[in-house]
Amino acid sequence: MEVITIFKWLETFKVVYETKNFSKASEILFISQPTVSSQIKQLENELNTQLFIRSGRKEVLVTQQAEILYERVVDLIDDWENLYQAVQINQQQTIRCVIGASHTFANYILPNLLIDLYQNFPHIRFSVQMMNSLEVLQAVEHHTVDLGFIEKPLSSANIKRVSLMEDQLVLAGDPKTGPWLIRENTSGVHYYTKRFLDEGDIKDPIIEIQNNEIIVGLLKRGFGCSVISERAAGGISYQMLDDSFKRIFYLIRRKAQDSEEIEKCTEFIEQWCKQ
């Protein structure tokens, strides 16, 4: 059996494991669903074990053997990417670093940080993805993001989390007129908003919006009220909240050793945020 064939099966396995869905996996991999099914079946035959339980529903179930294989596969694929980068360094002297950042950090802190990162690490090719805190954590776990910035104290066994800086939350807009504009429950600010509403026994009309900038845009137009970062409240009438509404921005990364350049980049970020 050719190594390249098995590697292709393992990449397909990784995507099926993460999506728990053969159709979604085929869309992500740009191959047909029968091809996905065939590759998984061939991998199961090669390993002489069942990896997924096909119950007739769209979402498949994973077996214990799949759990074990996934932990090794993500490291194997990551090792290959590091090897690929090492070869590229010899040719082009550049490596890639994908940054995942939750909304407030991405909009109000990352622009200045990214400029300094670009100037201090000319051999790193940076790319940025914006998502909510839980999505950032999952992306770091799945090795699709190298460094993550989150606004919620999330953690997992394979992730290292470092506190960077405080962020003061404020009550923006007029709560007497409403409606309340809130983020989805996997965002960093949702916990504080829900706590504020519960403590005040507030049951006013609520609009859920999965984007900070849309909320800020509505507030600037005099529509609604929301708990947002003071950094985002420029040009908006707001009230300061007490110290219990201070949160922390965190840097997260995998515990496994990164390249030397990424390590230096991480140290630079920690020092930069202390300035």
Image: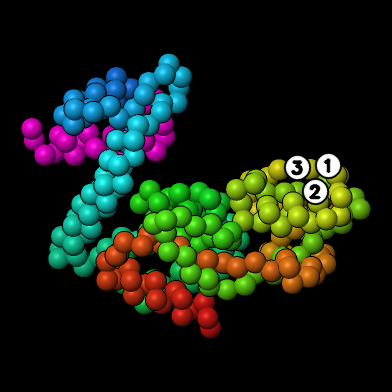
User: Badges 2 and 1: C-beta atoms under 8 Å apart?
Assistant: yes
Indicate the position of residue 126 as horizontal and vertical percent values.
37, 62
State how far apart marks 3 and 2 are (Cα). 6 Å
Kindly tell me whether residue 93 is visible in this rendering.
yes
**Is residue 185 rendered magenta in the image?**
no
The crowding category of the residue bearing disc 1, from other C-alpha atoms within 10 Å (few below 14, some 14 to 19, many at least 20), is few
Does 210 sit above or below residue 53? below
Does 238 sit above or below residue 202? below
User: Badges 3 and 2: C-beta atoms under 8 Å apart?
Assistant: yes
Q: Earlier in the sequence, mark 3 or mark 2?
A: 2
Which element is circle 3 on?
Answer: strand
Residue placed at 68% from the left, 52% from the top? Answer: 190
Residue placed at 33% from the left, 71% from the top? Answer: 263
Foreground pick, 52 / 171: 52
State how far apart marks 2 and 1 are (Cα). 6 Å
Q: Which residue is mark 2?
A: 180
Residue type beneath disc 3: Ile
Foreground pick, 259 / 66: 66
Q: Which residue is mark 3?
A: 207
Q: Which residue is mark 1?
A: 205
Q: Which mark is residue 246?
A: none
Does 52 sit above or below residue 244? above
User: Badges 3 and 1: C-beta atoms under 8 Å apart?
Assistant: yes
Does 233 sit above or below residue 67? below
Indicate the position of residue 56 as horizontal and vertical percent values.
43, 16
